[in-house]
């Protein structure tokens, strides 16, 4: 295992303390080449530092010397992207040699998390990805939704991923009218004594009260999963037989209902039949570059059908092969299922090393290939077209966002465009502890991977100003690990701005652009402006606030920031209050922990039914002795025998 400083076969740092700002590019190149000549030939991790000493990029290699050397020009006319990257951003090279290629992967991961390099691929958290989960431990499982497959839980089966969460939920709702699976919680299922309303509507076969046997339910479940995977021929055939029988018996309403279900199934699965290819389980990556922007599109194929896609827009100067390696590492390290085959547009450096790392995540072999012929070339072309189309939309969107940023910079008198904006809000209902939130907009759009929630630690009472000062102080202390924003915005008026100014002065950051956003004549926490009301922005060094005109770009952007911060803070506050209110009456019973409490509630459906049970019934629950059962019932206030 690697410690905070990796334990490696050889650990050496190559720096050049005598480097001066007067060094010419050619002198720097010669100095770096001397460093490269001293690199070991074994596996390890290399770090590129910029002119200010910050880590610009962290990479791994099977042969450090060979890999780093490939970044340098072979001739004066060499214009490869890797060469341009070194010329622009690399001023110092460091390395950590390791005992094995696997250890290089671990060290790279740790160094990326520690230094947060500017040019390593950082992916936003894909909250829209959903999987359908089937609980293998339940006799009559429902189709549940999960964000990430849980490792080490072989009892569950996962189907997906599905990129469009809304479309998946709509499909499951429509599916309920065709295949009557249960969709209630396990607790509700266990407490049912008679069929629910959905059974009366024909949307549930009521396994909770024994109206369907397990083999029949398993058949319904298999049909539902087949439809989600794009295989509906068997289900359509069965529905067509039912439609013919209903029409023959003159049950025309039933025949029409079955006809509509058949049409729906064919519409749902038609797009997946377009690309039925010789790729049973695999992901296809497409890439398209335009200036500093790069779009990466990933098409997910499962059982030979296109089931979903994902897109990522990156601002990067990395060469194509290094970008591909960095992207694949970040993409699959976030818990996504790793397929058997990954088709890429360009070979990453050390593909065998990357395949081995992904194979370890998958628990089986993984092949990374650039398709050369046949149907897989067509799939690669499809992914490339998806990337090109998505980048065109991203460029258009960025042009629109740039107009917003230019308008805001001009209105607030900022020296540069606020590409990175942080907005802070404090939530205080007066009934529980204060919480605060930070939302971040990058290039005018939310970057949810950088959102943060804060629990106030050192401020007593309902003190909004003290809470804001504490949060900003904690944030500014982390300026070494988190780059400072181009604009720091607080939700509030002149007093909140004063708090932000003091926090920046204490952190010796008086030149950090600040602003406070408040509504004119604001009442309560309403997110909408009253008639004639205008947004007001307080900035340091100005007595009167800046009043924004209605329906202007700068007003639109600041309103989005403030409302998003408010929404995020209120949501965090509500989650904390809900967590505190969930406390069960069983929490105070000695000997009843979280696992036992869950078993009791699942067995009886709630504390009310549990209190009415007998000692023998409670003791029948796994882990409950007769004495503990008696103590539980006494605590719940049962009637004495």
Image: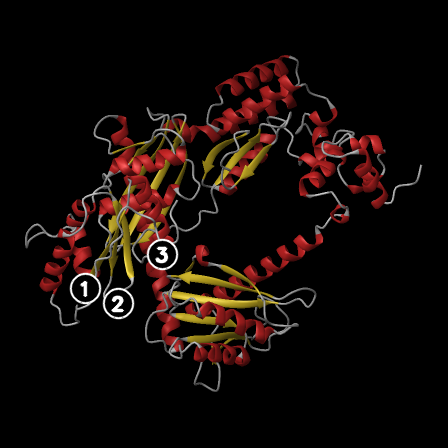
State the residue lying farthest toward the bottom.
543
631 above or below 157? below
Which residue is depicted at the point 44% across and 71% down? 488
Residue 186: x, y in percent? 67, 34
Q: Quadrant of residue 193?
A: top right
Question: Would you name the residue on which mark 3 appears?
Answer: 397
Q: Quadrant of the C terminus?
A: top right
Which residue is depicted at the point 49% across and 72% down? 473
Name the disc covering residue 16, or none. 1
618 left or right of 350 in image: right
486 left or right of 181 in image: left
132 left or right of 105 in image: right
Name the disc covering residue 52, or none. 2
Give the secondary structure at mark 3.
Answer: helix
Alpha-carbon span between mark 2 and mark 1: 13 Å
Give the secondary structure at mark 2.
Answer: loop
Dot placed on the residue nearer the N-terminal end, 2 or 1? 1
Dot placed on the residue nearer the N-terminal end, 2 or 3? 2
301 above or below 19? above
Q: Residue 173: tell me if it is visible.
A: yes
Residue 594: x, y in percent? 67, 43
Q: Quadrant of residue 94?
A: bottom left
544 above or below 336? below
Which of label 2 and label 1 is nearer to you?
1
372 left or right of 137 in image: left
């Amino acid at each position: 295992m690697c410690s905070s400083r990796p334990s490696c076969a050889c650990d050496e740092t190559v720096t050049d303390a005598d480097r001066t700002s007067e060094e010419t590019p050619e002198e720097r190149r010669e100095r770096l080449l001397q460093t490269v000549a001293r690199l070991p030939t074994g596996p390890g991790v290399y770090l590129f530092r910029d002119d200010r000493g910050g880590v610009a990029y962290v990479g791994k290699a099977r042969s450090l010397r060979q890999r780093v050397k490939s970044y340098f020009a072979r001739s004066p006319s060499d214009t490869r992207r890797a060469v341009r990257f070194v010329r622009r951003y690399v001023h110092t090279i460091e390395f950590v040699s390791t005992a094995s290629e696997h250890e290089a992967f671990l060290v790279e991961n740790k160094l990326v998390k520690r230094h947060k390099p500017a040019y390593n691929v950082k992916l936003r958290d894909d909250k829209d990805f959903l999987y359908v989960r089937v609980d293998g431990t339940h006799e009559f499982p429902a189709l549940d939704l999960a964000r990430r497959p849980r490792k080490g839980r072989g009892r569950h089966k996962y189907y997906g991923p599905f990129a469009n969460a809304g479309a998946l939920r709509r499909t499951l709702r429509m599916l309920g009218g065709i295949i009557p699976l249960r969709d209630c919680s396990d607790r509700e299922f266990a407490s049912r004594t008679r069929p629910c309303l959905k059974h009366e509507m024909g949307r549930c076969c009521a396994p909770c009260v024994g109206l369907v046997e397990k083999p029949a339910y398993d058949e319904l479940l298999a049909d539902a999963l087949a439809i989600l995977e794009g295989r509906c021929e068997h289900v359509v055939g069965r529905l067509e037989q039912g439609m013919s029988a209903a029409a023959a018996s003159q049950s025309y309403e039933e025949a029409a209902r079955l006809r509509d279900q058949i049409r729906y199934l064919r519409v749902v699965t038609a797009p997946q039949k377009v690309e039925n290819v010789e790729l049973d389980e695999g992901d296809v990556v497409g890439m398209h570059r335009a200036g500093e922007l790069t779009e990466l599109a990933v098409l997910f194929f499962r059982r030979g059908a296109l089931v979903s896609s994902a897109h990522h827009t990156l601002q990067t100067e990395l060469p194509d092969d290094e970008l591909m390696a960095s992207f694949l590492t970040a993409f699959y390290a976030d818990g996504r299922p790793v397929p058997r085959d990954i088709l890429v547009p360009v070979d990453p450096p050390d593909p065998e090393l990357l395949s081995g790392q992904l194979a370890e995540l998958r628990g089986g072999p993984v092949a990374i290939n650039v398709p050369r012929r046949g149907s897989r070339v067509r799939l690669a072309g499809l992914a490339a077209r998806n990337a090109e189309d998505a980048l065109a939309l991203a460029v258009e969107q960025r042009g629109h966002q740039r107009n917003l940023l230019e308008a805001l910079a001009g209105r607030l008198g900022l020296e540069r465009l606020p590409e990175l904006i942080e907005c802070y809000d404090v939530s205080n209902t007066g009934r529980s502890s204060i919480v605060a939130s930070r939302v971040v907009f990058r290039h005018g759009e939310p970057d949810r991977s950088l959102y943060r929630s804060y629990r106030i630690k050192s401020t007593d009472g309902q003190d909004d100003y003290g809470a804001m000062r504490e949060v900003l102080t904690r944030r500014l202390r982390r300026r070494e690990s988190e780059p400072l924003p181009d604009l720091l915005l607080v939700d509030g008026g002149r007093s909140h701005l004063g708090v932000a100014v003091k926090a920046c002065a204490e952190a010796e950051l008086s030149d950090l652009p600040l602003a406070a956003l408040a509504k004119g004549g604001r009442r309560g926490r309403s997110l909408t402006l009253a008639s004639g009301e205008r947004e007001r922005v307080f900035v340091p060094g100005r007595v009167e606030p800046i009043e924004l005109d209605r329906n202007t770009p700068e007003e639109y952007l600041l309103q989005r920031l403030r409302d998003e911060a408010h929404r995020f803070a209120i949501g965090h506050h509500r989650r904390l209050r809900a967590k505190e209110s969930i406390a069960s009456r069983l929490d105070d019973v000695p000997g009843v922990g979280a696992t036992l409490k869950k078993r009791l509630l699942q067995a009886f459906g709630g504390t009310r039914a549990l209190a009415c049970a007998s000692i023998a019934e409670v003791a029948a629950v796994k882990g409950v002795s007769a004495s503990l059962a008696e103590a539980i019932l006494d605590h719940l206030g049962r009637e004495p025998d």
